Amino acid sequence: MTVRTLNNNSNNIDKCPYVGLRPFRAEDGDRFFGRSTESHDLAALWQTNRLTVLHGSSGVGKTSLLRAGVIPLLDPGSVEVLPPGRVSHSSAFPLAALLKHNPYTFALLTFWSPNEPATSLSGLAVPDFLRRRKKRTDSYGRPLPVLAAIDQAEELFTDSIHHRRYQGPFIDELVEALDEHPDLHLLLLIRDSFRIDLSPYEHDLGQASQAWIRLLPLIPQTALDAIRGPLNVTDRSFTLGAAEELVDGLRTSEIVHAVGQRSTVIAEEIEPALLQVVCSHLWEALPDDINIIASHELHVYADVVRTLAEFCGRALIAIADDRGLPATELRSWLQRTFITELGRKSTVDEGLTHTAGMPNAVMRALENRHVIKAEQRAGSRWYELQHDLLIEPIRRMDDTALRPMPQAEPSEHLRTAAEALAAGELALAQQQAERALRGSAATDLRLRGEAESFLGNIAHERGKPTEAEARYRAAAPLFEVLQDTPAVARLLAAIGQSLLAQGRRAEAVDELRAAVDRVPNDLTVQTELGWTLWHLGQQSAAIAVLTGVLSIDGNAPEALRARGEILADMGEAKSALSDLDRVRRQHRPSTQAARGVALATLSNRGAANQEIDAALTEAPDSGPVLLYAARVAALSGHPDIAADLARRAIAAEDPQLPPHQREAALRLLNQGGRTNG
């Protein structure tokens, strides 16, 4: 007897109905099975609570549940759902072209508003973004609930050390957004092992309404649905009992002791990622003329141990290649570290930089590829194999499972580079982007341009503006040939900012003017030009450019910050505060310090000192912040303190003073010297 469901509109054996290791997407709803209960539960919790946290191990299917299970259940007439977001930005967009911004905020907003130019999102805080969005209402004129999700929220705690200082301000933005927008409902998806990192922020984020839900692996019945359901849109089907046999194979592990004694372990749960690996392999291995999948086909084409040994082998080869390790050494380490002499799973405690002798970056790579998983125990992160099912494949893995893989496509190298950059692994990101560049055809101008721009971003992240400039310059003519004018303009703006970081201010102005000529309606590029003119000492020209921006968009936060800071620097305190008071969040310490100068100019010394103290705490080696602190000290009648701060401002490196501010610092220093004399 055959259990068979046919869809006459789909006679397709070429397209695999199983998604493999990638997450399900919204368009995969017709092959997403086994999560009906969890989908309805999460949809209800998300709409009810201000904060909902979905947590689970790597590979358990959190992203798939959101995209293919939950979002399709939501009524667009009753709720407004923002596209799922992440806090890591992985595109080749030249980041140096952006104004000063919180990288977590910028990344999230590019997901939440994918059709908006990235330049218009830089500098916005989450509350700013939500405030300027047009609210949708129901038939009674009431605002619809806004459902917003942040996927892979653990990236907030695993990203580059260069971004750590943005973590607290980003969470503050989320808290402010939830406080200001009562219709906002936030969903966070995070790995189990990072729950402890999120816990300090639970109260502020969730306020009085929050829910936590853990996503568990599949049980036999739901695993059966996940295996059989996707075949509904194909001409293939399982015979009665065959799918059940496959489920049994995915939960049964043969354990071999060191002395050769064998035992069998039957698990209650099935890992979704491993189910997809085996089912995808089965589908691809079946000959085209086989439509009925019986026990015989499972034995021939879906040997679970062999399939998973090959899966683990591919993962080890890729990781070893990325990290410059011998694959055989990595295999031996995996076998002795995670399998005991009794043939059981072993656990290891994560160290500060290495775990069981292997760099922590390798542990994260193994987790990302679903070979191992992590969990929190007593405040520490512990690793173990993803499932008992992997014990025997890893134990029996030989050199045939470590055969070199075909050379990856350049686009695959660039994707891996993006993942590495998102994880803060700059060296690996650079290595992969360079491979993409070397492996790309000379005629593939777009990929080559993206790779060069990506390498420019890495140099920018590392604080190497000369190298960043060279990479952006290499990318610009490639996009020029493609007649992609916006891309060329963004690269010119990035070149301008890289030149500015090198102190080559006049050249920076030239590049930014060229960028403005190409995209005259891009207010962010015009704002950058205004800032650069100020750095060149052309305050009046800078004010004119920024006033032009604000005549088009009177609430542009970066233009308000820039004009307010420049006006404060020029001594026009009332006008400066008029701009700065309209900016709710003072992202830049220099802007906060400039506000202090304006307040001191108007004799509000107490408030001025509060602003200066906060700015100095945040940026103690900032030339502009130290100069503004010196000016407040001078206005408060403390020339000796002003002189000391001016001396520090002249020596500061993060950032240095532009020439016209350096002259102002020297004047303060001289005035202090005359007073002491």
Image: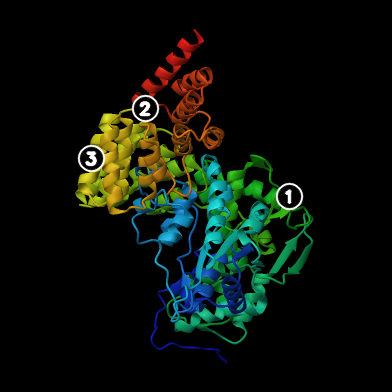
Q: Where on the picture, by quarter, is residue 248?
A: bottom right
x and y percent of residue 458 in the render?
A: 42, 40
Q: Within 10 angstroms of label 2, few (less than 14), some, or many (20 or more) residues?
A: some
Q: Where on the picture, by quarter, is residue 141?
A: bottom left
Marks 2 and 1: CB-CB under 8 Å?
no
Residue found farthest to the top: 677
Kindly identify the residue that appears in the image at 29 percent across and 48 percent down: 549
Q: Secondary structure at mark 3?
A: helix
- Relative depth, front residue between 554 and 474: 554
> Does 132 sit left or right of 54 as displayed?
left
Q: CA distance from mark 1 to mark 3?
A: 53 Å
Location of residue 651 with respect to 536 vertically, above or below:
above
x and y percent of residue 481 in the render?
A: 20, 48
Q: Which residue is mark 3?
A: 513
- Image quadrant holding the N terminus, namely bottom right
Marks 3 and 2: CB-CB under 8 Å?
no
Q: Which residue is mark 1?
A: 379
Mark 1 vs 3, N-terminal side:
1
Q: CA distance from mark 2 to mark 1?
A: 47 Å
- Mark 1 or 3: in front is 3
Res 434 visible: no
